[in-house]
Image: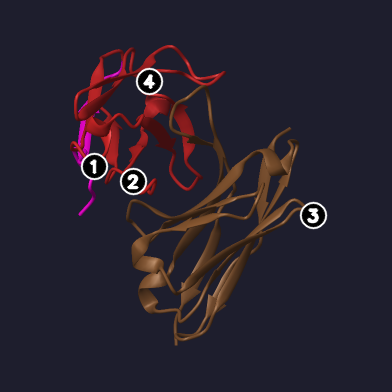
Chain colours: A brown, B red
């Protein structure tokens, strides 16, 4: 079945970097994009950016420009999200989600990973 | 403050019908971008509930329906059940193709 499996929880100190992985299975990885979405404790969903698994094109949320990098490894069907210069307000659950197009409409996020908790604390 | 505005909470008794609104602007929903809806049960990842304004993925009960008009969209849930108690999020795009989420609505089944 189609699924995205993410790496385990991380605890980081302020100023450090974190890299979260998202391994896809059950579909042709390069036929879809991957979005990254985070959710701070008790808060709503925040879109972080998107990467095409076909050609590596990216589109990052403006507030994270310069701190975030999204990549893919097509040989292992895995997407990665690296966030640098971590701050306490980066503490959140980080999700990857597959972006699916239908017809000519805007893509939806139809399959989600289980989430990775990143805690930033001194 | 989210660009897409949702009511923080709604409630209803079992069997009733509730609606959740999602208000945007001419820069996002009103510009023709589709609206999608997600359901997030406590402690779990979000799940796609409605895509393309009004389409249900396979396996989503027909009690859930979506609509879009102008700069707003709505999610309706009829025949409310206890298991529908969750957070609901709308999502669309802006002209830079950045995804936008609403602030989320907590549904309480009384």
Q: Which residue is mark 4?
A: B81
* Relative vertical location of residue B13 with respect to residue B98 in this rendering, above or below: above
Range of magenta residues: B1-14
Mark 1 — residue? Answer: B4
Q: CA distance from mark 1 to mark 4?
A: 26 Å
Q: Disc 4: which chain?
A: B
In front: mark 2 or mark 4?
Answer: 2
Question: Which of the two residues, B62 or A31, is positioned nearer the viewer here?
Answer: A31
Q: Secondary structure at mark 3?
A: loop
Confirm or deny contact between disc 3 and disc 1 (CB under 8 A). no
Question: In the current view of this chain or complex, which residue is farthest to the right?
Answer: A75
In this rendering, the label closer to the viewer, 3 or 4: 3
| Chain ID at mark 3 | A
Q: From what the image shows, is residue A122 above or below residue A65? A: below
Q: Which residue does the numbered mark 3 point to in the structure image?
A: A76
- Chain letter of the residue beneath label 2 in the structure image: B
Q: Nearer the viewer, residue A96 or A93?
A: A96
Spatial CA distance of label 2 from label 4 is 28 Å
Circle 1 chain:
B
For marks 1 and 4 on the same chain, the one whose residue lies earlier in the sequence: 1
Horizontally, residue B91 falls left or right of residue A93, namely left
Assign the N terminus of chain B to one quadrant of the image.
bottom left
Q: Is residue B53 left or right of residue A23?
A: left
User: Looking at the rendered structure, which numbered label has been put on residue B100?
Assistant: 2
Residue B23, position as x, y percentages in the image: 19, 35
Say which element carries label 4.
loop
Which image quarter: residue A79? Answer: bottom right
Q: Is residue A111 left or right of residue A61?
A: right
Q: x and y percent of residue B63 in the render?
A: 39, 13
């Amino acid at each position: 079945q189609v699924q995205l499996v993410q790496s385990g929880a991380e605890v980081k100190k302020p100023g450090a970097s974190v890299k979260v992985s998202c391994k896809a299975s059950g579909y042709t990885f390069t036929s879809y994009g991957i979005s990254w979405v985070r959710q701070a404790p008790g808060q709503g969903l925040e879109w972080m950016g998107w990467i095409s698994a076909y050609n590596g094109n990216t589109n990052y949320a403006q507030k994270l420009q310069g701190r975030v990098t999204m990549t893919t490894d097509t040989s292992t069907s895995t997407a990665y999200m690296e966030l640098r210069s971590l701050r306490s307000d980066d503490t959140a659950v980080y999700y990857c989600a597959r972006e699916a197009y239908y017809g000519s409409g805007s893509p939806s996020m139809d399959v989600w990973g289980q989430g990775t908790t990143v805690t930033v604390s001194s | 403050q989210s660009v897409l505005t949702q009511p923080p909470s709604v409630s209803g008794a079992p069997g009733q019908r509730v609606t959740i609104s999602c208000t945007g602007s001419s820069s996002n929903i009103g510009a023709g971008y589709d609206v999608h809806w997600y359901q997030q049960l406590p402690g779990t990842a979000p799940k796609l509930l409605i895509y393309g304004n009004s389409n249900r993925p396979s396996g989503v009960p027909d009690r859930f329906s979506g609509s879009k008009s102008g700069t707003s969209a709505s999610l309706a849930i009829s025949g409310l059940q206890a298991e529908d108690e969750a957070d609901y999020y709308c999502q669309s795009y802006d002209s830079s193709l950045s995804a936008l989420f609403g602030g989320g609505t907590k549904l309480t089944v009384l």
